[in-house]
Amino acid sequence: MARDIKESRAEIDALNRELVEKFCRRMDVSADVADYKREHGLPVYDRTREREILADMADLAGPDYRYYAKIFFTVMMDLSKARQSSLLAAAHAESHPEDVSVRIRRAMETTSAVFPDGGLVACQGVEGAYSQIAADRLFSLPRIRYYGTFGDVFEAVERGECEFGILPIENSTYGTVNEVYDLMQKYHFSIVRSVKLRIDHRLLGKPGTRLEDIREVYSHSQALGQCRRFLEAHPEIKTHVCRNTAEAAATVAAMGREDAAAIASESCASLYSLAQLADGGTIMNAGRNDTRFICITKDLRVYPGATKISLMLTLPHEPGSLYATLAKFTAQGVNLTKLENRPIEGRDFDMRFYFDFEASPAEERIRYLLSDLERSCETFAFLGGYSEI
């Protein structure tokens, strides 16, 4: 006859209390180990010792539980290493004024308590571009200046022509805008806010134009990709890449041709006196299509209420480096909202990683996590702590 479940649960509860007591004691001893490692310049991770401990614990657990024991003690040691790393990061920050945790704390102390309602804002494109729509969402009274390329936007902020820049960073169906990440790495700018826009591409042409007459379509490469299925269904249409969708609409309007159309926003139709073709409906691959736009500044700023952090980093090319990094996030209870990798040009299968996660840079433990990542990763870039609207 099976044992009564109440008795079993009572015993489990008692064992859990014992485990918590032992766990806390183990973490306290782990802190002592961190002090020793700091004084003697030793690394947190000792692969040889960890391998031996896992083998010993598996043997002690016996054949029925050896793999369970391995997983249990692997997690335990991950938490221990995360605790040690956090303590070492805190000690490092105290004596290194350029540590990322110190820079963030300094930025929070000097950043205005309120996000501005206006200012000179650089956007890529022309009136009607999605970047302009994003700028109007982020600021109530922006003064927008338009530039030809993403690089020109960064240059405008670098030269002080504009205080802010607005750029697309990610699309829900077409992925990351890698060029913007490359520019963020080059200029070391800071993300101070972001906005998610619903994208609704329309096929726009000269009034009176019929869909069957269209032979050429103009748009940005991302928009063309987001409307790939429509274009594949019309192989007779030749595509032309423009710097942005609003520029494509302006180009088609200036042509006045009945065989040319643009893929752009609905607002561009009235702005450039164009008509919506394809029955006036969306022509996108997916029913829902969102693009995240970021607002950048030259200097590091962290406005109150920041709940999102973005990083870019490369890891040592060795087994377990990504797992060890993810374990640090797990130990702090951090929710990753983006993890993406991309090959580094000119390097044999080395990867650069993009991280977005939900956390407040105002929390000391989060700043020490960033400090630990800065010291342990091959390269590290704090892209910003900000809020998204």
Image (tube, rainbow, N blue to C red):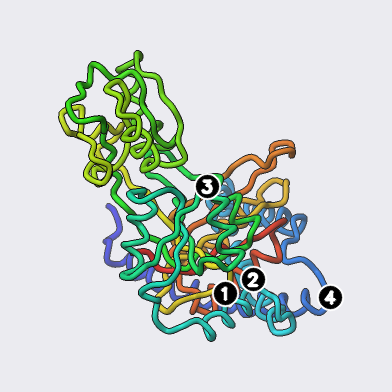
Can you tell which of label 1 and label 4 is closer to the viewer? 1
The answer to whether the residue labelled 2 contacts the one labelled 1, judged by CB atoms less than 8 Å apart, is: yes
How far is the residue under mark 3 from the one under mark 4? Answer: 51 Å
- Tell me the kind of residue under disc 2: Ser
Of callouts 3 and 2, the N-terminal one: 3
Q: Residue 45: x, y in percent?
A: 72, 62
Q: Which mark is residue 40?
A: 4
Number of numbered tags placed on the structure image: 4
Q: Which mark is residue 367?
A: 1
What is the crowding at mark 3: few (fewer than 14 residues within 10 Å), some, or many (at least 20)?
Answer: some
Name the quarter where the C terminus is drawn: bottom left
How far is the residue under mark 3 from the one under mark 2? Answer: 34 Å
* Residue at horizontal 19 percent and vertical 30 percent from the top: 207
Element type where label 3 sits in the image: loop
Q: Which residue is mark 3?
A: 149
What is the crowding at mark 2: few (fewer than 14 residues within 10 Å), some, or many (at least 20)?
Answer: many
Element type where label 2 sits in the image: helix
- Tell me the kind of residue under disc 4: His
The answer to whether residue 9 is left or right of residue 157 is left
How far is the residue under mark 1 from the one under mark 4? Answer: 24 Å
The answer to whether residue 343 is left or right of residue 239 is right
What is the crowding at mark 1: few (fewer than 14 residues within 10 Å), some, or many (at least 20)?
Answer: many
How far is the residue under mark 2 from the one under mark 1? Answer: 6 Å
The answer to whether residue 44 is left or right of residue 258 is right
* Residue at horizontal 54 percent and vertical 44 percent from the top: 178
Of callouts 2 and 4, the N-terminal one: 4
Of callouts 1 and 3, the N-terminal one: 3
Q: Nearer the viewer, residue 379 or 333?
A: 379
Can residue 191 be seen from the camera position used here?
yes
The answer to whether the residue labelled 1 contacts the one labelled 4, judged by CB atoms less than 8 Å apart, is: no
Q: Is 200 located above or below residue 369 in the figure?
A: above
Q: Which mark is residue 371?
A: 2
